[in-house]
Amino acid sequence: MSLISVSGSGGAAGGTSLVTMILLYAVIIGVFWFFAIRPQKKQQKDHDSLIATLEVGDSILTTSGFYGVVIDITDDVVVVEFGNNKNCRIPMKKDNIVEIDKQSSES
């Protein structure tokens, strides 16, 4: 009879450690999401809203540090004119735009 009672108490302790381990993993995943994934998604959302306001004639800054003026916009690609040379027009992905300076409409 004592064999059954020892077995029963061991099973209860095992169940408690399983619940504790599951809660520990849930807390670790929650903390990871809060400090790593959530800020990255917020940053991506801010960048998407920045790209949505892009218009022809805007001055931009690229990820590589070049300043240019937007000449043409398609779905994923913009054509940017760099420097004073009007022949230096380079197509690039919209994801490479870091900053947009809107042109004032003084007409």
Image (cartoon, rainbow, N blue to C red):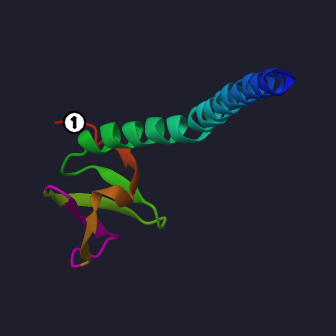
Q: Which residue is mark 1?
A: 105
User: Which is more toward the observer, 107 or 81?
Assistant: 81
Q: Quadrant of the C terminus?
A: top left
Q: Assess whether residue 84 is covered by the magenta stretch.
A: yes
Residue at position x 47%, y 67% in the image: 64
Residue at position x 81%, y 20% in the image: 5
The residues colored magenta run 75-87
Q: Is residue 74 above or below residue 92?
A: above
User: Which is more toward the observer, 52 or 15?
Assistant: 15
Q: Quadrant of the N terminus?
A: top right
Q: Residue furthest right?
A: 2
11 sits to left or right of 60: right
Query: What type is the residue that disc 1 sits on?
Result: Ser
Picture coordinates of residue 63 (x, y %)? 45, 62
Residue at position x 80%, y 22% in the image: 9
User: Which is more toward the observer, 4 or 86?
Assistant: 4
